[in-house]
Amino acid sequence: MSNRYDTDYEPVTAPEPGTLPSEHDRSRRSLLGRLLAPLVVAVGAIVKFGAFFLKFFGIFLAVGGYALIWGWSFAIGVVLLILVHELGHYIEARRLGLDPQLPVFIPFLGAYVALRNVRFDPWVNARVSLAGPVAGGLGAGACLAAAVAVDSDLLRALAYAGFLLNLINLAPIGILDGGHVLRSWRVLRAGGGSVDPRRARRLSDVVAVASLLTAAALVVGMVAAHVPQDRL
């Protein structure tokens, strides 16, 4: 066998230091891909199917999206806790004679219950808005009770997440439940609404106290459900 040398041959050399992605870079890209993938799927599905998709399949996409980050068990638990929160809005609205739509899930953004053909009433709006965090807090409390009964860190983590999400929802900001409550409180405090001005101001006190008590209960729940992380 004869040897043949190719004048165009370039020897393979080891890559220079720093030219290969580090383990940290690969991990970061992997996490970014896991975060973006469900969002891309969600946007594509919404564009294709519109409102029909959001109403009937959003909850399943939400579970799948959260599962890519935290695993199936935690994802299902979080979505169920969000559902309990939204059902609080829905049931209270129905109880007050309103016409609410069933909860609609938007992956990574939460969910909402739309009210149809409703004229703004500050007292009604405050009660419907507070019903979500109250119901969500009770759902998180049920998770915590079950966690204590069976000694489950997964259920404790779900309880903590539930308390935290509902507490965030009570923040007096924009479209959050706390923002709706604040708007109602301001109108009632000014003597507005469909009731006597003096009664409206008394109702504003009820709204303020109910909001503060709900927030305090959620904070206590978070402290009770907290699991120390030795790794941090």
Image (cartoon, rainbow, N blue to C red):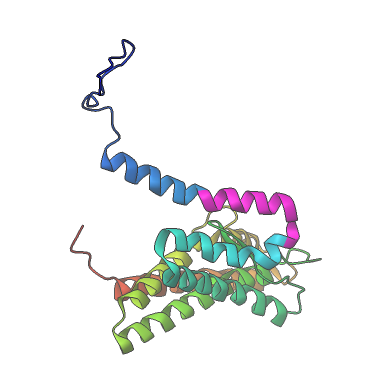
Q: Residue extending furthest left?
A: 230
Q: Residue extending furthest top?
A: 7
* Side (left or right) of 102 relative to 6: right
Q: Is residue 192 visible?
A: no
Identify the residue at image location x=29%, y=71%. Answer: 226
Q: Is residue 164 above or below residue 44?
A: below
Residue 116: % across, % down: 78, 66
Residue in the foreground of this view, choosing between 210 and 161: 161
Please check the rendered image and state whether residue 220 is part of the magenta-colored stretch, yes or no: no
Q: Residue extending furthest right?
A: 117
Residue in the foreground of this view, choosing between 119 and 24: 24
Q: Is residue 59 visible?
A: yes
Quadrant holding the N terminus: top left
Please check the rendered image and state whether residue 49 is part of the magenta-colored stretch, yes or no: yes
Identify the residue at image location x=45%, y=59%. Answer: 68
* Side (left or right) of 110 relative to 158: right
Identify the residue at image location x=52%, y=50%. Answer: 37
Residue 33: % across, % down: 45, 46
Residue in the foreground of this view, choosing between 153 and 224: 153
Residue in the foreground of this view, choosing between 56 and 90: 56
- Magenta-highlighted residues: 37-52
Residue 174: % across, % down: 58, 52
Q: How many numbered marks appear?
A: 0
Residue 53: % across, % down: 70, 61
Main SS class of the magenta portion in the image: helix
